[in-house]
Image (cartoon, rainbow, N blue to C red):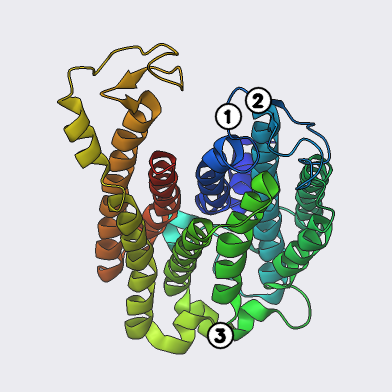
Amino acid sequence: MGNGMWKAWLGAIRPKTLPLAVSPVVAASMAMWSTVFEGVWGGSYLHRPCPVVGGRPPYPYGDYGRCLTSPGWYAAVTLLCVGVALFLQIAANLANDYSDGIRGADETRGGDEAVSGKPRRLTASGLVSPKRVLLAAGVSAALACVCGLAVTVLTGHWWFIALGLVCLVAGWCYVGGRHPYGYHGFGELAVFVFFGLVATCGTSYALSDEVPFLVVWTAVALGLVAVGVLCVNNLRDVDDDALHGKRTWMVRLGRGRGLVAAEAALIVPTAMAAMSYVSYAPLIRVARLAADPRCGTVFDGASDTTGHVACAGMPWWDVTAAFAGTAMLCAAIALCVAAVRALRGGAYRRALPMAGLLSPAVALVFGCAYLMGA
């Protein structure tokens, strides 16, 4: 396979959209760490590990409250959830390439992106037969199913299989089938539900058997970022979409009101992340505690029950999370401002990657905030 073909396949999986799939899993995993390891399932880092297959013992029976979820189990479920999200996203992207290609909606996507201003598509370019693109989508979907089955076995939540089937159907019917909902203005709603609520809350439940409000709040924010990314993409394609009967929100609203909607979908979740982060006042805590002469002291078991290195009575991971989260918040604000400015200048190609990177930045802001608030 030549270098040009590899670039074509890489473009078909749309790498700029992949952070949207990973971010909800990362945010939920960081948010639920304290719940799983110090909350209802353990209460202490000293407890012995629970069984790692079939999930935790049910309350109030068995070893509930007397065992600790294995860190290896937690990492395995998190990574498998990442696999589910990534492979489902790639499968959906390839299925969209196939469906839009055979419908003619990508007829302007067959040439060089530098000339057309739009990413090249496999099916529309004729570089690869539509059947091969569809086969690649099927393989990616199968890999997502394998990861999903592994999550089901490790957690014991067999209803995840039904949820996975719903996700597969939603991915295909976005622009595939006889009545694709993406052509009738429901794509943005589906993106909010699956890239926000389902991915974030599903990961939380897989790891902890619960979905607290803080996870739902995070899910709403990440879902809005995903909607914003789709709006940016559809603003770029608004003329072609209107020509081929693809009634996205941007087509229905028009460029003017569509621009406002896209900006709001990026600004609101950034503000939500800032609100959550500032509520923990991390820099104030660090500054106040840094004046304590005990900063840098390693406490023993008699003076520090956690047995960890602490800075001014604040665990080292809190200090790290405070500065990392602050850096991520600054990055999220900068990305949001840059994306909005690019949008207002009509530079959609420049705005799209910045909007995509906003998702992991916002996810890490939430994650660091919740780690510190534990």
Residue type pointed to by label 2: His
- Mark 1 vs mark 3: in front: 1
Q: What element carries label 2?
A: loop
What residue appears at the point 36 percent right and 13 percent down from the top-left corner? 299
What residue appears at the point 73 percent right and 63 percent down from the top-left corner? 167
Figure check: 94 above or below 373: below
**Contact, mark 2 vs mark 1 (Cβ under 8 Å):** yes
**Which residue is denoted by mark 1 in the rendering?**
44
Q: Where is residue 105 in the image (x, y as percent from the top left)?
A: 61, 75
Q: Is mark 1 on a helix, strand or loop?
A: loop
Is 369 on the left-hand or right-hand side of 288? Answer: right
Instruction: State how many labels appear.
Output: 3
What residue appears at the point 78 percent right and 52 percent down from the top-left corner? 141
**Contact, mark 2 vs mark 3 (Cβ under 8 Å):** no
Q: What element carries label 3?
A: loop
**Which residue is denoted by mark 2 in the rendering?**
47
What residue appears at the point 76 percent right and 48 percent down from the top-left corner? 144
Determine crowd level at label 2: few under 14, some 14-19, many 20+ residues with C-alpha closer than 10 A.
some
Figure check: 18 above or below 343: above
Determine crowd level at label 1: few under 14, some 14-19, many 20+ residues with C-alpha closer than 10 A.
some
How far separated are the C-alphas under marks 2 and 1? 6 Å
Residue type pointed to by label 1: Ser
Q: Position of residue 250 (x, y in %)?
A: 45, 80
In this rendered view, identify the residue nearer to me: 67 or 150. Answer: 67
Give the quadrant of the C terminus: top left
Check residue 247 in the rendering and tell me which mark sits there, or answer none: 3
